[in-house]
C-alpha cells in the first residue's frame, strides 16, 4: 500500500476545491503502473466527490445542499460536547458530508488514473475555514 | 472595525512547539480534540467572521496550576507576528509576590493593553485586598480589566467567585477603572445588566454559547433573559463582541449578533466602538 496525505487550507465556510492534479501527481510519484487509487478525507464535516468542474455546477450543488440541509433548523447536534469542552455547531457540515460521501476510487492502468473526460475529484469543505487532511492510498494489483 | 474582545490563543501553532505545554493547555483549559492552527488559519477564520482584530487573553494560574496557560511574553510574541490583527492583554497571579512588578512590565516593556483575571479559578473575590495594588496599577496606567464572570468550563473553577454582584463594590469604589464582566456573567445576565445600567465603567462581552446553537442561545439570552431593548436602548455603549474562541464558534456568533434586532448603530458599537472606548486607545 502506497499512502500519501494532502494538506488543504480552506478559507470559506463551504468550499469546493478540485484536487485531481494532486491525486495524479501522487500516482505518478508512486511508480505504480496498475492498481486502484482511493481518495479519502480524514474529517467528518468534509466530503470527497466526483463531478464536472464548472462554476455553474458548483453553484447548483452548493445551493442544493443548502436547501436540503438549512442552517436554520433545530438540530440536536447543537450543544456543549464535554469531551471537546466546546460547542458543537456544525451539524450541517456532518449531514452534507453524509450526502457527498467521504471518498472515491479510480483504476490505474499503465500509470494513468482512468477517469471520464468530465470527471474531476472535489474536496468539499462544509465547516471551514480549516486545515484539512486528505489521504491518497494506492493498492497495486 | 470589528473586534473579538475574548480570544484565547492557547493552541496557536507558534507557541506550541513543546508537547508538554500543549498537554498542559488542553488540561487546564478543558479544551480537547482541537488542532494547533497556524496564523494562516486564524486569518481565514477572521475573514469569514468579518473580524478585523482579536484581543488575545492569557491566564496566569501559577498558584493553582503551577504556570500560565499562555504567558505575557507569549502574547507579546503572537502580537508581534501580526500587530495589525492582534491586541494583547496581560495576566498575573494575584498571589504572586511579584505580581505588581510583572504587570507593570507587561504594560510598559511588553506594551500589553489590559489585564485578564479569573477569580473563579484561583478562588478569590474581586474585593480581596490582595488585588488592591493591581487595581491601583491599572488605574495608574489607565488599563482595563477583563474578569471572567459567571460559569467557567475550566476544571477547578467555582462560579460563586465570579457572580456579577460580587463586582459591584469594585465598580462603585473605583469608578475610573473600566472592568468587563466576560461571558455577560451568564447565567446571571440580569445581574450583569443591573451593574451596567448603574455603573458606566462596567462592560460585558458576548462570549457565551453554553446551550443550543449561536443564534438560538443569543436569542434566548439577549431577547428573552434580558429584552433586546435593554441593550439597544440603555446598555449599547457597554457591550462588546467576544467569542471565547476556541471554545465557542467565532463565525456563527458574529453572524448571530446581527439577528437580534439591534439597530445598526448599536451593532457598530458592539462590534468595535465600545471596545475602543474600553481599551482607552484608538489602536
Image (spheres, coloured by chain):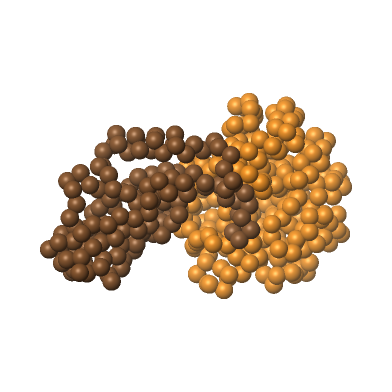
Residue A86: x and y, percent? 60, 54
Horizontally, residue B153 falls left or right of residue B55, namely right
Rendered image quadrant of residue A6: bottom left
Horizontally, residue B80 falls left or right of residue A24, namely right
Question: Residue at position x 71%, y 38% from top?
Answer: B221
| Residue B55 appears anywhere in the view | no
- Is residue B260 depicted above or below A115 in this figure? above
Seen from the viewer's position, the closer of residues B14 and B248 is B248
| Residue A36 appears anywhere in the view | yes
| Tint applied to chain A in the drawing | brown
Seen from the viewer's position, the closer of residues B192 and B179 is B192
- Is residue A22 depicted above or below A120 in this figure? below
Instruction: Please identify the quadrant where the N terminus of chain B is shown.
Output: top right
- Is residue B164 depicted above or below B223 in this figure? below
Question: Residue at position x 68%, y 43% from top?
Answer: B205
Question: Residue at position x 25%, y 52% from top?
Answer: A20
Residue A122: x and y, percent? 31, 49
Instruction: Please identify the quadrant where the C terminus of chain B is shown.
Output: top right
Chain letter corresponding to the colour orange: B
Residue A89: x and y, percent? 56, 47
Question: Residue at position x 84%, y 46% from top?
Answer: B165
Residue B142: x and y, percent? 72, 48
Total residue callouts = 0
Seen from the viewer's position, the closer of residues B51 and B139 is B51
Amino acid at each position: 500500500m502506497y499512502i500519501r496525505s494532502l494538506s488543504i487550507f480552506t478559507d470559506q465556510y463551504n468550499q469546493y476545491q478540485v484536487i485531481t492534479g494532486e491525486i495524479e501527481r501522487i500516482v505518478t510519484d508512486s511508480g505504480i503502473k496498475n492498481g486502484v487509487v482511493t481518495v479519502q478525507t480524514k474529517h467528518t464535516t468534509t466530503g470527497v466527490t466526483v463531478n464536472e468542474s464548472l462554476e455553474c455546477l458548483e453553484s447548483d450543488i452548493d445551493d442544493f445542499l443548502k436547501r436540503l440541509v438549512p442552517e436554520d433548523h433545530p438540530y440536536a447536534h447543537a450543544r456543549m460536547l464535554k469531551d471537546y469542552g466546546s460547542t458543537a455547531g456544525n451539524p450541517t457540515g456532518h449531514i452534507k458530508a453524509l450526502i457527498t460521501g467521504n471518498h472515491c476510487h479510480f483504476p490505474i492502468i499503465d500509470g494513468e488514473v482512468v477517469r471520464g473526460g468530465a470527471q474531476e475529484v472535489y474536496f468539499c469543505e462544509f465547516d471551514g475555514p480549516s486545515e484539512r487532511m486528505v489521504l491518497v492510498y494506492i493498492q497495486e494489483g | 472595525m470589528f473586534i473579538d474582545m475574548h480570544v484565547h490563543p492557547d493552541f496557536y501553532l507558534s507557541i506550541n512547539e513543546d508537547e508538554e505545554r500543549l498537554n498542559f493547555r488542553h488540561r487546564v483549559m478543558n479544551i480537547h480534540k482541537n488542532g494547533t492552527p497556524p496564523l494562516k488559519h486564524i486569518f481565514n477564520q477572521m475573514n469569514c467572521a468579518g473580524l478585523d482584530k482579536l484581543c488575545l487573553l492569557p491566564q496566569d494560574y501559577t498558584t493553582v496550576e503551577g504556570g500560565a496557560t499562555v504567558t505575557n511574553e507569549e502574547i507579546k510574541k503572537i502580537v508581534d507576528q501580526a500587530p495589525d490583527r492582534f491586541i494583547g492583554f496581560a495576566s498575573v497571579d494575584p498571589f504572586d509576590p511579584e505580581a505588581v512588578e510583572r504587570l507593570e512590565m507587561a504594560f510598559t516593556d511588553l506594551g500589553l493593553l489590559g489585564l485578564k483575571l479569573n477569580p473563579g479559578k484561583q478562588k478569590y473575590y474581586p474585593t480581596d485586598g490582595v488585588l488592591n495594588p493591581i487595581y491601583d496599577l491599572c488605574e495608574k496606567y489607565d488599563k482595563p480589566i477583563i474578569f471572567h464572570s459567571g460559569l467557567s468550563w475550566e476544571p477547578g473553577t467555582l462560579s460563586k467567585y465570579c457572580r456579577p454582584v460580587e463586582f459591584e463594590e469594585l465598580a462603585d469604589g473605583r469608578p475610573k477603572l473600566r472592568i468587563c464582566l466576560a461571558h455577560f456573567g451568564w447565567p446571571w445576565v440580569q445581574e450583569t445588566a443591573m451593574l451596567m445600567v448603574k455603573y458606566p465603567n462596567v462592560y460585558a462581552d458576548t462570549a457565551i454559547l453554553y446551550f443550543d446553537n449561536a443564534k438560538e442561545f443569543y436569542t434566548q439570552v439577549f431577547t428573552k433573559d434580558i429584552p433586546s431593548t435593554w441593550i439597544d436602548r440603555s446598555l449599547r455603549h457597554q457591550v462588546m463582541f467576544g467569542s471565547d474562541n476556541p471554545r465557542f464558534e467565532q463565525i456563527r456568533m458574529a453572524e448571530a449578533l446581527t439577528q437580534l434586532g439591534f439597530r445598526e448603530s448599536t451593532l457598530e458599537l458592539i462590534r468595535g466602538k465600545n471596545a475602543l472606548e474600553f481599551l482607552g486607545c484608538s489602536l
